[in-house]
Image (cartoon, grey):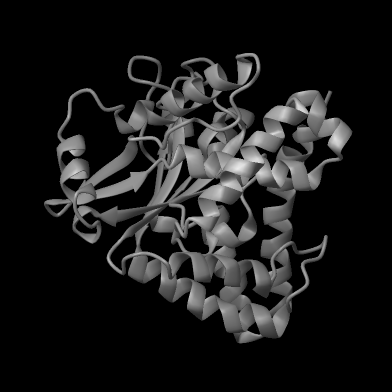
Amino acid sequence: MFPYAAYLRVYEPVTAFTEPARTLWTVYADSRRRPRRIHALGTEHRNAARRFIAWPPEVVPDRESRDAYVRRSDDMIYVCPWQTRLRSWLAFERFRDERSASVAAAFVPPEVGERAAREFEHWKQSGRSLRHHIRTSRWHVPLAWFVPFAGAERCLMLGAPGTGYRKTDDAFQEHAGHGPATAAPARTLIYVTSMGEARRRVSSALPVVRDSLGDAAGDAIPLSAGRLETIDRWLGEFHPRALVELDYGGLVHLMDDRALCADESVAEMAVALAAMRRGEVELAVAMYKRLLARWRPVRALESAN
């Protein structure tokens, strides 16, 4: 079972990488030994679990990962490096900031945590970039993540081949009668768009959100200009011909087939923004209420016992 997290990924064309990385990723993409897209998240999870169940736990791997997510389109190879070491440092830094020292020590011995913090500080002082290709959100998809995409860019897969596998928007009707959905790796819900479209949609939404919602996120509508600006800046760090992917990741296992088929969060966000742009407040609020009604129960499972 995957972690209950969603992922926002950027795949850059292999030509955007400097040598020797460009050659290394080109060879990697053709390698039969690399984890395939359908198995890559599971491989990442197993590697992380092995590090953390060791004693003392290995909070951050000693070396950066040489793996990546790979896509091909129009004879171009697109690469999203895992950057496991950098992402582990960033995640552990957030973990320590959000919890008291006593709680953090219950998960990671203080000496291990201090060593990881020192190594990260030394790494940053070396002048290396903190740019990372993958953002992670536990237990929910942030509303701002829906903005770069369009409803037509959705790809939904339920189950796995031989167990009611379907790759259509009417998957629930076709899947009905085949029993409960499987938790196989093929169970996914993803959106993929071009970097140009993603930036255009975010740039178009920003003034609307600033004028209507402002910078402060509230409980009623947890979407703010500040959160959208963060996504805008992050997307601006990458090649203009990159691809952007929203992957529901392990969250698909918190939603049954009917809920996944009915999930039109991206389309509902687009309708809400268009309604705000036209001054149709009631329609915008109705769309936000639908989004919140879908995601609040999912996010509440984080504190379920």
Give the camera-side residue of 72 and 238.
238
Q: Is residue 163 above or below residue 227?
A: above
Residue 2 coordinates in the image, percent (x, y): 54, 26
x%, y% of residue 268? 58, 61
For the residue pair 11 and 66, the one nearer the viewer reads as: 66
Q: Residue at x 70, y 37 (%)?
A: 114
Q: Which residue extends farthest left? A: 75
Q: Residue at x 88, y 32 (%)?
A: 102
Can you say which quadrant of the picture contains the N terminus? top right
Where is the C terminus found, in terms of image quarters?
top right
**Numbered label tally:** 0
Q: What residue sits 56% from the left and 49% below the top?
A: 122
Residue 122 appearing in the image: yes
Q: Pick whichever, 61 or 279, lies toward us.
A: 61
Answer above or below: position of 130 versus 253.
below
Q: Nearer the viewer, residue 279 or 66?
A: 66
Where does the image place residue 21, in percent across and percent down from the top left? 23, 48
Which residue is at a point 67% across and 55% down the rendered structure image?
291
In the image, residue 242 above or below residue 210: above
- State the image coordinates of residue 194 (x, y, percent, origin top left): 33, 62
Q: Quadrant of residue 236?
A: bottom left
From the viewer's perspective, tell me whether residue 121 is left or right of residue 293: left
Report the side of 111 relative to 228 (left or right). right
Please indicate whether residue 251 sits to the left or right of residue 28 in the image: right
Q: Look at the image and tell me whether residue 1 can be seen.
A: no
